[in-house]
Image (spheres, rainbow, N blue to C red):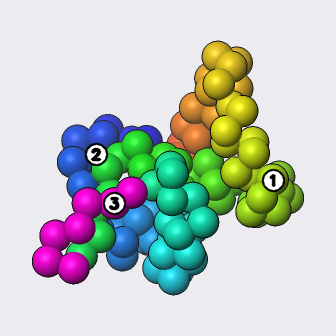
Amino acid sequence: MTGEEKARRYYSIGEVARLLDLEPHVLRFWEKEFRRLIKPLRVSGRRLYRPEQVEMFRRIKRLLYEEGYTISGAKKKLAERDTREEVLKEVRDGLREILSLLEKE
């Protein structure tokens, strides 16, 4: 996550959708499928996501779109991803992705 992303406490579903280049309905679907991992704060009917939830959406997107996992496979992968190396690799990959996006702007 960028410094600006870390400074924010909450993001609306539209903001998360723009950050991840996804449609809001995809995020709502993933929220239902990964209920144990993503529980947004709801204020006046609006979903608000913490930075770590945005990062979880990023991980889900990577597993489904880049690594070719199914929803079921991604759930299993996220449940078993407790090793230090996997976490560090995902952080590095995420930082590289952010850097490449920033370089394009």
- The answer to whether mark 1 and mark 3 are in CB contact below 8 A is no
- Out of 1 and 65, give the one closest to the viewer: 65
Spatial CA span between label 1 and label 3: 23 Å
Q: Residue furthest top?
A: 84
Q: Report the residue at 48% width, 75% height from top.
A: 28
For mark 2, what is the residue?
4
Q: Report the residue at 51% width, 59% height from top.
A: 35
Of the two numbered discs 2 and 3 on the same chain, state the one appearing first in sequence. 2
Q: Quadrant of residue 16?
A: bottom left
- Identify the disc placed on residue 40: 3
The residue carrying pointer 1 sits among few (fewer than 14), some (14 to 19) or many (20 or more) residues within 10 Å by Cα, namely few
55 to the left or right of 73: left
Spatial CA span between label 2 and label 3: 20 Å
- Residue 1 in the image, given as x and y percentages of width and height: 43, 42
Q: The disc labelled 3 sits on which kind of residue? A: Pro
For mark 1, what is the residue?
73
Of the two numbered discs 1 and 3 on the same chain, state the one appearing first in sequence. 3
Q: The disc labelled 2 sits on which kind of residue? A: Glu
The residue carrying pointer 2 sits among few (fewer than 14), some (14 to 19) or many (20 or more) residues within 10 Å by Cα, namely few
In the image, which residues are magenta? 39-45
82 to the left or right of 28: right
Q: Is residue 40 magenta?
A: yes
Q: Quadrant of residue 10?
A: bottom left
Of badges 1 and 2, nearer the viewer stands 1
Q: Is residue 103 magenta?
A: no
- Out of 58 and 19, give the one closest to the viewer: 58
